[in-house]
Image (tube, grey):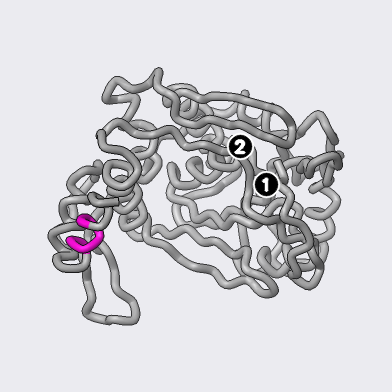
Amino acid sequence: MGRYAEEFHRSLADPDGFWGEAARAIDWYREPSTVLDASNPSFSHWFPDGVLNTCFNALDRHVRDGRGDQAALIYDSPVTGTQRTYTYTELLDEVARFAGVLRSLGVDKGDRVIIYMPMIPESPIAMLACARIGAVHSVVFGGFAAAELATRIDDAAPKVMVSASCGIETNRVIEYKPILDRAINLARNKPERCVILQRPQAVAELTAGRDLDWSQAAAEAEPADCVPVAATTRCTSCTPPAPRPSPRAWSGTTAATRSRCAGAWTTSTTPTPARCTGPPPTWAGWSGTPTSSTPRC
């Protein structure tokens, strides 16, 4: 903890110097001239004039720098007994193709996408795909009840929803598609399209004209390149009982994550693969009450 304590105190004593150094460790389309704009203390902005893409920093730069064959994401599900490892090259291909799916559905910079998924590799793939094209993503726990999901749909007004046919909780299968359909029927701001990942444990019936099969759409999609992003935010709205979106500037999040990876979590500059081993407690009650702490994968 010695190095962590040292870095922590330095970040408080000299935030501009500390985070300016962190910013220089990531790739920018336009480097920021200001580290922190605190002119309005209630709404401070990190790197306000910088332009970057978080997906490029998470994936493309590592492939560019010769780490394409290194493990980027390790999926190890205690629920299904499934283990899978994605290299940076493999993960980049999956993300670019799904970004192409979203773009083919009309998703552009600033549009919202809700991700209603279990803890499987396709969840971060969808998040990174949104970041790649500058879309805002809102993550809702997979299996969240229809009424609560509907309030989050109305709050985000997504152009597209991304979901799976089901999630798996120990020895039972939770079908997501019926919950999603009920939520969309309840919502005022209905999404234009839904992308559904079909899982073998429960194959969902797709709604003609609205739903797409993830695998089929990805196979036919043209991979999408990264776009420069200035103030795009991501938003998480899974706090019960009502959505409480928490916008995060991509620039600050990217710099902070890179700083932690190189500092507190490892002593080298080599990125550590993300590990997907199981979700936080699942919130599934109609009133927003937690009903299970079992991993849902």
State the quadrant of the C terminus. Answer: top right
Going 22% across and 79% down the picture, which residue do you hit? 39
In front of the other: 296 or 37 = 296
Which circle marks residue 117 in the picture?
A: 1
Q: At which x and y percent is residue 273?
A: 43, 33
Which amino acid type is marked by label 1? Met
Task: Report helix, strand or loop for mark 2.
Answer: helix
Going 31% across and 47% down the picture, which residue do you hit? 264
Going 49% across and 49% down the picture, which residue do you hit? 108
Image quadrant in which you'd find residue 277: top right
The answer to whether residue 240 is above or below residue 115 is below
Label 2 sits on residue: 122
Q: In terms of secondary structure, what is the magenta stretch mainly?
A: helix
Answer left or right for 99 relative to 177: left
Q: At which x and y percent is residue 96?
A: 48, 32
User: Badges 2 and 1: C-beta atoms under 8 Å apart?
Assistant: yes
Q: At which x and y percent is residue 29?
A: 24, 45
Mark 1: give few (<14), some (14-19) or many (20+) Cα within 10 Å: many
Going 60% across and 42% down the picture, which residue do you hit? 123
Which mark sits nearer the N-terminus, 2 or 1? 1
Q: At which x and y percent is residue 30?
A: 20, 49
- Residue 229 falls inside the magenta stretch: no
Looking at the image, which residue sits at the far front? 2
Which amino acid type is marked by label 2? Glu
Mark 2: give few (<14), some (14-19) or many (20+) Cα within 10 Å: many
The answer to whether residue 267 is above or below residue 160 is above
Answer left or right for 10 relative to 132: left
Magenta stretch in the rendered image: 6-11
